[in-house]
């Protein structure tokens, strides 16, 4: 018996690894070669493409597709309906194949807000926070708070998620960065 939960409406392809205590909810599809860590939660209508690697304690909200070429490290949060891409110049009539996808790395503890878009080929730094609706078009530094279209850094955030003051101090954790 599996030590994870998959709702009966979801599809899990052969060759998938799913970690202990992970929950996969309604209408999800996990494609071959995908690896999902322990204690993850995948909301309704999540698609995990071929060969995607997802760390431990990752939360992916409803209506998110994690495409081939994307890696999510431990503790990443993907808000509802946020978007990843893996091809900068897609054409239906001229497919490039997975070997030409641009890689995206989302580092430990990063948060991506609802309806944000992450253009492929970039790294989102540890514990960064991407605001809802932002469009990420470049690498994001650790702890950066990014907002807008295209996303620009508007501040810094603590590991706990609190916006840091002008001295890069967290009033909640009392940490300095």
Image (spheres, helix red, strand yellow):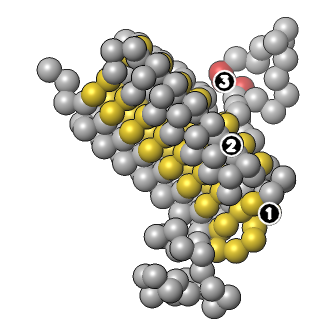
Q: Secondary structure at mark 2?
A: loop
According to the picture, the residue beneath numbered tag 1 turns out to be: 152
Mark pair 3, 2: CA separation = 27 Å
Mark pair 1, 3: CA separation = 30 Å
- Furthest residue to the top? 93
Query: Marks 1 and 3: which is nearer the front?
Result: 1
Q: Secondary structure at mark 3?
A: helix
| Image quarter of residue 54 | top left
| Residue at left offset 50%, top offset 86% | 171
Residue 41 lies, in percent from the top left, at: 39, 39
Residue 21 lies, in percent from the top left, at: 25, 38
Residue 34 lies, in percent from the top left, at: 44, 26
Going from N to C along the chain, the mark reached first, 2 or 1, is 2
Q: Tags 2 and 1 in contact by the CB under 8 Å rule?
A: no
Query: Marks 2 and 1: which is nearer the front?
Result: 2
| Residue at left offset 52%, top offset 83% | 170
> In this rendering, is residue 32 above or below 63?
above
Mark 2 closeness class: few <14, some 14–19, many ≥20 residues within 10 Å: some
Res. 136 visible in picture: no
According to the picture, the residue beneath numbered tag 3 turns out to be: 99
Residue 115 shown left or right of residue 67 in the figure: right
| Residue at left offset 85%, top offset 8% | 93
Going from N to C along the chain, the mark reached first, 3 or 2, is 3
Residue 39 shown left or right of residue 54 in the figure: left
Mark 3 closeness class: few <14, some 14–19, many ≥20 residues within 10 Å: few
> In this rendering, is residue 10 above or below 69?
above
Exactly how many numbered labels are in the figure? 3
């Amino acid at each position: 018996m599996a030590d994870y939960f998959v709702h009966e409406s979801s599809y899990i392809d052969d060759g998938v690894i799913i970690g202990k205590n992970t929950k996969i909810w309604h209408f999800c599809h996990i494609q071959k070669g995908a690896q999902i860590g322990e204690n993850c939660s995948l909301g309704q209508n999540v698609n995990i493409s071929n060969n995607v690697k997802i760390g431990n304690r990752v939360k992916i909200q409803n209506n998110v597709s994690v495409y081939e070429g994307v890696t999510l490290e431990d503790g990443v949060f993907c808000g509802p309906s946020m978007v990843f891409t893996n091809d900068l110049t897609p054409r239906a009539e001229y497919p490039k194949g997975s070997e030409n996808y641009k890689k995206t790395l989302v580092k430990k503890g990063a948060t991506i807000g609802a309806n944000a878009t992450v253009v492929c080929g970039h790294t989102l730094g540890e514990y960064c926070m991407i605001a809802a609706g932002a469009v990420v078009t470049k690498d994001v530094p650790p702890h950066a708070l990014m907002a807008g279209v295209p996303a620009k850094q508007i501040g810094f955030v603590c590991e706990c998620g609190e916006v840091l003051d002008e001295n890069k101090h967290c009033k909640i954790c009392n940490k300095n960065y």
